[in-house]
Amino acid sequence: MNLSENSNLSNNKLYNLDVIDKMCRGNKEQIIKMVEVFIDQISEAILEMEAAYSENDIVKFKKITHKIKPTLTYYGTSTLEKKLVLTENLVSKEIPSDELKLEISNLKSISKEVINEMKNDFKITNI
């Protein structure tokens, strides 16, 4: 695998691993481990957000979004990050709404796209 092909943001890439590449000093194995951690953490966070929303636990929901926002920045997932910010803004109103429910669904959908792209690019099958 040529990491540079996968880590550079092109017009259709949903992520950019330039920051992760610098953090790992170009160590491809470490980058793959970091991608696997990202996949695991984001998948778990989305499930926790859905549960918090269904339980109407706004405080928990806010904590989760606050926790994962920097991670999205590090991994260059700007589309996902923008969706998270929008969702976070709706949650800050502390009023459950159809719009919020739709944005959570969109957030989940985009996160799945990002994860699937990463899995395909790095040939990750064990997660």
Image (cartoon, rainbow, N blue to C red):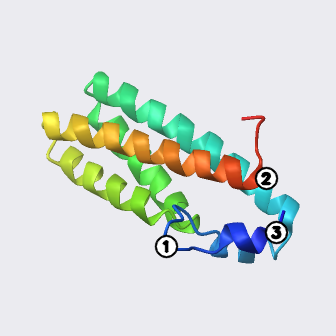
Image location (x, y in percent) of residue 47: 47, 31
Query: On the image, numbered disc 3 is attached to which residue?
Result: 2
For marks 3 and 2, give the CA distance. 16 Å
Tag nearer the camera, 2 or 1:
1
Amino acid type of the residue tagged 1 in the rendering: Asn
Q: Secondary structure at mark 2?
A: helix
89 or 121, which lies in front? Answer: 121
Q: Is residue 96 left or right of residue 78?
A: left
**Res 11 label:** 1
Q: Tell me, yes or no, whether the two marked residues, 2 and 1, touch with CB atoms within 8 Å.
A: no
Q: Position of residue 45 (x, y in %)?
A: 50, 39
- Label 1: state its secondary structure: loop
In the image, is 79 to the left or to the right of 43?
A: left
Res. 20 in view: no
Left or right position of 85 against 28: left
Label 3: element kind: loop
Residue tagged 2 = 33
Looking at the image, which is closer to me, 18 or 70?
18
Depth order, front residue of 92/36: 36
The quarter of the picture where residue 125 lies is: top right
| 34 in relation to 116, above or below | below
Q: How many marks?
A: 3
